[in-house]
Image (cartoon, grey):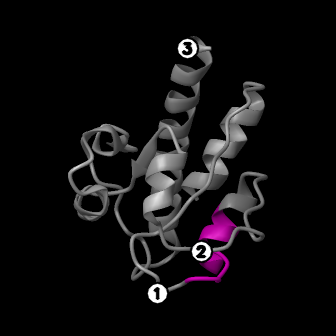
Amino acid sequence: MAEGLLRHHIQKKDLRIEVDSAGTNGYHNGEAPDHRAQAEMRRHGIEIAAQESRQIKRDDLDGFDLILVMDSNNFQDVMELAGDRADWKNKVQMILQENDVPDPYFGNATGFTKVFQLLDEAADSWSEQWRKSQ
């Protein structure tokens, strides 16, 4: 959902920014987003069915200017992946600044609605920061 929402807000602001997403584990590698996430996004006119899950790798830390993570566990996992590279560690930030995005996976569709709202606001805020810095 975060990738789709970041792309959506970047496109609305006519920015030229590359967005990709990756998980910190490989449990769902190669899979499309959860059907409930897809349904929530479609309710707002955003299609994410073509997205495909993959696991983050060290090359991502070198290749991207910013790594946004969903929660404190992901933050720790990516910091460990960064090792002793301070330049990589400085790229890692929480997408909601200091709060975790709740994981809606084990709940019902209502959780995906809440996550959509949180990530939509965050994606708008991040893309606005990027717009102002260009």
Dot placed on the residue nearer the N-terminal end, 3 or 1: 1
| Three-letter code for the amino acid on which mark 3 is drawn | Ser
Q: Which residue is mark 2?
A: 53
Q: Nearer the viewer, residue 64 or 85?
A: 85
> Does the magenta segment cover residue 32?
yes
- Mark 3 closeness class: few <14, some 14–19, many ≥20 residues within 10 Å: few
| Cβ atoms under marks 1 and 2 closer than 8 Å | no
| Image location of residue 1, percent across then percent down | 58, 59
Q: Which residue is mark 3?
A: 133
> As drawn, which residue projects farthest toward the bottom?
27
| Image location of residue 88, percent across then percent down | 34, 44
* Element carrying mark 1: loop
**Residue at horizontal 36%, vertical 56%?**
101
| Three-letter code for the amino acid on which mark 2 is drawn | Ser
Can you say which quadrant of the picture contains the C terminus?
top right
Q: Over which residues does the magenta segment extend? A: 29-40
Q: Is residue 91 left or right of residue 28?
A: left
**Vertical position of residue 7 compared to residue 2: above or below:** above
Dot placed on the residue nearer the N-terminal end, 1 or 2: 1
Q: CA distance from mark 3 to mark 2?
A: 30 Å
**Vertical position of residue 94 compared to residue 47: above or below:** above
